Amino acid sequence: MKKMFFLIVCILTVNISCQKKNVVSNSSKSTIDTLYEPPKSLYFDNDNIKDEVKVQAKKTDDLSSFILSVQLSSLNRTIEIPIFNNSILYNNIESDYFLSDPINKDKIIELRVDYADQITNPNIFGEKKNLIEKIKFRFNSKNKKIQVIGYEISYSKDNKNKCRKSFNFITGKYYSSCYFDNEKKNTSGSTSELQNIYTENWNRDFLNKLILYGDEVE
């Protein structure tokens, strides 16, 4: 797991090689300072040549402190996908977040994001703790773009009731469930707004809309 402040301390105190690199980015800057981790090689973009994927820490402080960097051999370019700190969307204070190494299965990249379990400021929907996100990406060979195909968020509400939301961005379907004192409530639905989501759509405006789906079971 990679902890944000630990990586920043490493930059300041340890002689780690960092460099600038011009890349295609979904963020506002085309050139950023990054701390390099060993990349993983995998078949991702359907050309039978291995691609490189890695999580990188950004030295700048904006909407995210990590990016998922994917080098696409078929396009001869690198795509950077911001991994946002979404803790403030669920609570009124921002907490540290941690990323797992990318998991590759059947040409799908999955990231897990864990948020520090710290004291937060309850919002009108109640305090949410033990936040865990999972995000899935795949390469769309028809339009040569990286597609976000799935998202899942799980958390404990008010430190006891457990909730989970999952989204399929291929079908546009969503599912939300909560357990309240062993009583389960759930809801589901579908909408075209949740279909055909690509990395350029993966931004704070979209996530603000996303978290409203399924809230009625809470």
Image (spheres, grey):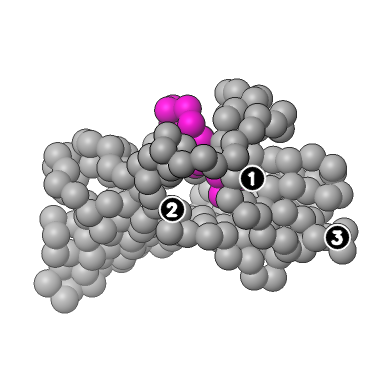
Q: Position of residue 63 (x, y in %)?
A: 44, 31
Pointer 1 residue: 69
Q: Is residue 120 magenta?
A: no
* Rendering quarter of residue 162: bottom left
Quadrant showing the C terminus? bottom left
Visible residue check, residue 202: no
Q: Earlier in the sequence, mark 3 or mark 1?
A: 3
* Span shown in magenta: 55-68
Q: Residue at x 53, y 60 (%)?
A: 101
- Relative to the observer, which residue lies in front, 7 or 17? 17
Q: Amino acid at mark 2?
A: Lys
Badge 3 marks a residue whose secondary structure is loop
Q: Is residue 87 left or right of residue 181?
A: right
Q: What amino acid is found at the position of numbered circle 1 in the picture? A: Ser
Which residue is drawn at the image coordinates 47% and 27% (left, top)? 60
| Type of the residue with mark 3 | Ile
Is residue 60 found inside the magenta-colored segment of the image? yes
Q: Secondary structure at mark 2?
A: strand
Where does label 3 land, which residue? 49
Choose the circle earlier in sequence order: 1 or 2: 2
What type of secondary structure mainly makes up the magenta span? strand
Pick whichever, 34 or 161, lies toward us. 34
Query: Could you say which is closer to the camera, residue 130 or residue 59?
Result: 59
The residue tagged 2 is 2
